[in-house]
Image: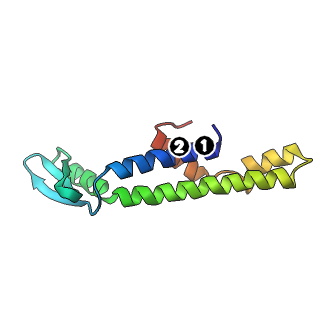
Amino acid sequence: MTPADTLRAAVDRLRELADAAPEPPWTEDGVGDIGFGVAMGGGRGVDTGDDGPDGRAVAQYIAAMHPGVGNALAAWLEAAARYYEAGVTAAADVFRDDPAGRDRFLTTGPGAPSPHAIAVARQILGSTA
């Protein structure tokens, strides 16, 4: 799988998850019988099952990572895929007679994929390699 393929697979997965989730706003709920929770659009919610500081931290984190954040991350990953593909096209033109230069440009030079975007994509896909 190319770096662009990895990025686009993560984009598809993230958008699928964001589209299936309730619309924002998501907010942290107070302590109930089973701990902190997150109130989501449409009257839906989720409980952390923990009424201590960890439960509150989990609820706040979940609330912060609502579908709007997922869609913004997907847009960033999509832009990273397009940027990498543009680098591949440019490298084919510029390094036509220099395969080693092309490879360096696409692996360690300015045409290399964003290591941060690749790391995020791999986490979304459940992979570290």
Check the image and report above or below for 102 versus 68. Answer: above
Q: Is residue 26 above or below residue 124?
A: below
Give percent across and percent down for residue 120: 50, 48
Q: Which mark is residue 9?
A: 2
In the image as oriented, which residue stretches furthest toward the right? 97
**Dot 1 crowding, Cα within 10 Å, few <14, some 14–19, many 20+:** few
Left or right: where 102 falls relative to 120: right
Question: In the rendered view of the protein, which quadrant contains the N terminus?
Answer: top right
Residue lying at 17% horizontally and 44% vertically, measured from the top left: 49
Q: Nearer the viewer, residue 36 or 9?
A: 9
Q: Residue at x 85, y 48 (%)?
A: 101
Which residue in the protein does label 1 denote?
A: 5
Q: CA distance from mark 2 to mark 1?
A: 6 Å
Quarter of the figure with the C terminus: top right
Q: Is residue 29 left or right of residue 120?
A: left
Looking at the image, which is closer to me, 11 or 98?
A: 11
Q: Amino acid at mark 1?
A: Asp
Q: Please give the label number shown on residue 115.
A: none
